[in-house]
Image: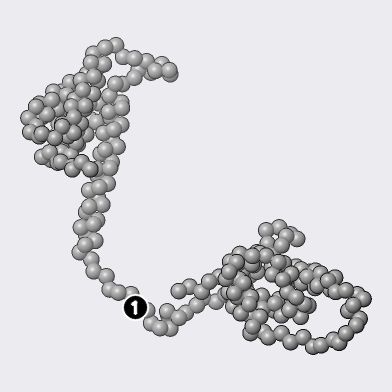
Amino acid sequence: MAIPIKLEAFEGPLDLLLHLIEKNKIDIYDIPIVEITAQYLDYIKQMETDDMNVMSEFLVMAATLIDIKCKMLLPKEVDETGEEEDPRAELVQKLLEYKLYKYMSLELRDRQVDAAKNLYREQKLPPEVALYKPPLDYEQLIGDMTLNRLHEIFKTIIRRQEDKIDPIRSRYGNIEKEEIDMDVKLLYVEAYAREHGHFSFRKLMEKQASKMEVIVTFLIILELMKTGRITISQENLFDDIMITWMPVPA
């Protein structure tokens, strides 16, 4: 990587040109190219550096100035719109951009110096403020869903569970009371939600083995919505409901 070398007060050919323009109080949009070229060439003749990379940059600019000087002596060219082209236009644009970035860097440097003088106290919030949680916006959690729409989806899932029952075999055997542990099912739903992150409400319900599990899972979904652990959304009417797990902030 090349080491940047600062020559006196100038960091490059554009910096030197800008200095000459400001020193001579010249309008940057109307540069007297002959005068500026002469002063620029006088400067690079006095340069003392063995770094050819640095010197080549100044020599390239010197060649550019001489080229512009020659074009200024020739009849002016006309562009497609019929207006005369100014050979200095491209150089003026580069100088304006360099001047803008130079002043921006100076402003940022001053701000850095001023900021170094400021000391900030470590943030310490009272426990009651740190533990504060804003109240949940239930309308935002539910989005464009309605209780009627949730009820319709719930009935559809229950109907599918009933369709899985064999109408003949279901008449035989003992009917036992089905026990569902709410805590276990809650842990199952939370683990499922954490694992999938964004998932289908319908697919979750279809994974349940019985009507009672569907009911319990449905109640758990409502509870997680109430506590803000999940949000639900539906893009279009009659589309599937999508559930998004909301991780607890650290």
Q: Position of residue 57 (x, y in %)?
A: 20, 31
Location of residue 65 in the rendering, given as x and y in whole percent from the top left corner: 21, 23
Residue 22 in sight here = no
Q: Front-most of 211 and 89? A: 211
At 91% from the left edge and 81% from the top edge, which residue is drawn?
171
**What residue lies at 75% left-to-right and 75% top-to-bottom?**
209
Camera-side residue: 194 or 122? 194
Q: Quadrant of residue 233?
A: bottom right
Specify whether 163 is left or right of 19: right
Q: Is residue 72 above or below residue 155?
A: above
* SS class, disc 1: loop
Give the side of residue 165 with respect to residue 247, left or right. Answer: right
What's the residue at 15%, 41% (across, down)? 5
Percent position of residue 185, x then y: 66, 80
Q: Quadrant of the C terminus?
A: bottom left
162, 59: nearer the viewer: 162
Q: Position of residue 30 (x, y in %)?
A: 25, 26
Q: In terms of image quadrants, where is residue 16?
A: top left
Q: Is residue 234 above or below residue 63?
A: below
Q: Residue sitting at 34 percent across and 78 percent down?
A: 124
Which residue is situated farthest in the top direction here?
75
Residue nearer the viewer, 204 or 94: 204
Splitting the image into 4 quarters, where does residue 72 fall?
top left
Please name the colour scheme applied to the rendered image.
Answer: one colour
Residue 135 at least partly seen: yes
User: What residue is pinned by disc 1?
Assistant: 124
State which quarter of the image contains the N terminus.
top left
From what the image shows, is residue 149 above or below residue 38? below
Q: Amino acid at mark 1?
A: Lys
